[in-house]
């Protein structure tokens, strides 16, 4: 059976290992695109949108790491700053 196209917020929370309230906040901010379905307006996140969000996080994390070195390079830079 193929994976479902749309996920409930609780399913997204499970995938990301965060609370449903945190997912709701991400959806309301527009960080994770979602749709409201039905008369009661149940939020659903398309599986492909969740994957795009995760890929975006990987990209942002890599950019952060590249601009905020950690380890020998950072220690060398810190040592130079202390000597100055």
Image (cartoon, grey):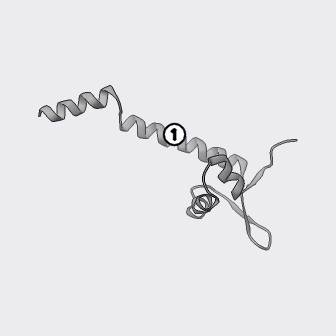
Reading the image, the residue beneath label 1 is 59
Helix, strand or loop under label 1? helix
**Location of residue 47 with respect to 21 vertically, above or below:** above
Q: Say which residue appears at 84% left-offset and 42% top-offset.
A: 2
Neighbor class of circle 1 (other Cα within 10 Å; few <14, some 14-19, many 20+) is few
The image position of residue 58, as x and y in percent, is 54, 39
Q: Residue furthest right?
A: 1
Q: Residue furthest bottom?
A: 39
The image position of residue 13, as x and y in percent, is 65, 53
Viewport quadrant of the C terminus? top left
The image position of residue 11, as x and y in percent, is 72, 53
- Residues 35 and 65: in front is 65
**Residue 10 placement: quadrant:** bottom right
The image position of residue 72, as x and y in percent, is 31, 26
**Location of residue 84 with respect to 25 vertically, above or below:** above
- Residues 81 and 6: in front is 81
């Amino acid at each position: 059976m193929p994976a479902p196209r749309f996920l409930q917020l609780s399913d997204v929370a499970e995938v990301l290992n965060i609370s449903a309230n945190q997912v709701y906040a991400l959806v309301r901010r527009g960080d994770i695109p979602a749709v409201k379905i039905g008369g009661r307006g149940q939020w659903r996140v398309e599986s492909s949108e969740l994957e795009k969000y995760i890929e975006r996080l990987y990209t942002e994390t890599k950019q952060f790491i590249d601009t905020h070195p950690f380890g020998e390079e950072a220690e060398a830079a810190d040592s130079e700053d202390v000597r100055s």
